Image: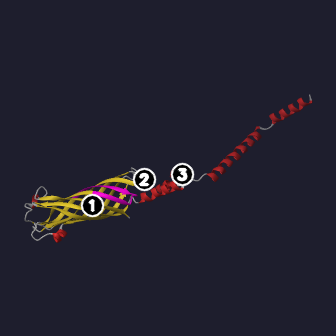
């Protein structure tokens, strides 16, 4: 009986306890819990940052081993050379013809410029702007030619500027394969000992394919053909200069060159 009285008094006290006091305790408990969660997040969570492409690449896939970190850093370093100044040195042969004077001329070409790969298609599409120079001559052959041989000293040269569109695809981690198509304008000269000569405005188109190693080193094989438009000329076999572009008297010079391309 005594215990029943004690239980009844306890239950009565609970029901008579103000509801505000219970709500206050629950609210304080929730606030304390929320504060604990907030402090833990502040301690263990890094605030978001605006990171560059390179910084994101360094942390790509949360690299854990030194090899993975090195590979990630190498990719970042190599990508930097996708858009840079470059120098290209090429050698090959240029075919020229004026009437019966047909020549295959040893050729040297140098061009320097800037290449930029756009931030789309994973840096596969790009362009170049450059200063171009080329000289093709068989003059050195005269040192080995007999005075009685039917030899004609012939020289062709071009200096100008140009631009090219590039597309490059990866082969593996270090090698890429690329192709390009270009267009140039400049000044062309042609002369031979038949006293045929052309000096004037010229344009050209080019096609190139290449292999790229670590973005900086390229081995290129290219084709380029030139179009003479107008200028100063001296003729013996050239015939009618006014219809030169359509004439077979002066075949458009064609250069095939292979060379090395270095990105600074």
Q: Nearer the viewer, mark 2 or mark 1?
A: 2
Q: Which residue is mark 1?
A: 162
Residue 50 in view (yes/no): no
Q: Residues within 10 Å of mark 1 (few under 14, many from 20)?
A: many
Figure disc tally = 3
Compare residues 139 and 17 and report the one nearer the observer.
139
223 relative to 116 in the view: left or right: left
Q: For mark 2, give the secondary structure.
A: loop
Quadrant including the N terminus = top right
How far from the left and from the top, in percent, is residue 211?
A: 34, 55
Find the residue positioned furthest to the right. Answer: 2
* Label drawn at residue 62: 3
Q: Residue at x 41, y 55 (%)?
A: 174
Task: Find the magenta span and give its range.
Answer: 204-221
Q: Is residue 132 left or right of residue 194?
A: right
Closer to the chain start, of discs 3 and 1, is 3
Which residue is located at x 37 percent, y 53 percent? Answer: 176
């Amino acid at each position: 009986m005594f215990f029943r009285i004690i239980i009844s008094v306890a239950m009565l006290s609970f029901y008579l306890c103000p509801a505000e006091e219970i709500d206050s305790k629950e609210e304080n408990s929730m606030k304390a819990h929320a504060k604990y969660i907030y402090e833990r997040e502040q301690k263990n969570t890094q605030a978001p940052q605006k990171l560059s492409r390179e910084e994101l690449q360094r942390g790509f896939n949360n690299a854990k081993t030194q090899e993975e970190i090195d590979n990630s850093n190498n990719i970042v370093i190599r990508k930097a050379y996708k858009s840079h100044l470059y120098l290209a040195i090429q050698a090959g042969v240029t075919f020229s013809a004026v009437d019966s004077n047909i020549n295959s001329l040893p050729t040297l070409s140098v061009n320097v410029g800037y290449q930029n790969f756009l931030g789309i298609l994973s840096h596969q599409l790009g362009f170049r702007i450059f200063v171009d120079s080329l000289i093709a001559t068989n003059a050195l052959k005269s040192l080995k030619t007999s005075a009685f041989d039917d030899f004609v000293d012939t020289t062709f040269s071009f200096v100008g500027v140009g631009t090219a569109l590039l597309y490059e695809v990866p082969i593996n981690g270090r090698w890429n394969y690329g192709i390009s198509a270009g267009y140039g304008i400049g000044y062309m000269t042609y002369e031979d000992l038949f006293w045929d000569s052309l000096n004037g405005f010229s344009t050209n188109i080019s096609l190139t394919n290449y292999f790229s190693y670590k973005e900086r080193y390229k081995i290129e094989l290219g084709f380029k053909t030139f179009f003479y438009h107008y200028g100063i000329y001296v003729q013996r076999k050239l015939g009618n200069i006014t219809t030169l572009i359509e004439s077979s008297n002066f075949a458009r010079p064609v250069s095939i060159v292979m060379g090395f391309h270095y990105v600074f």
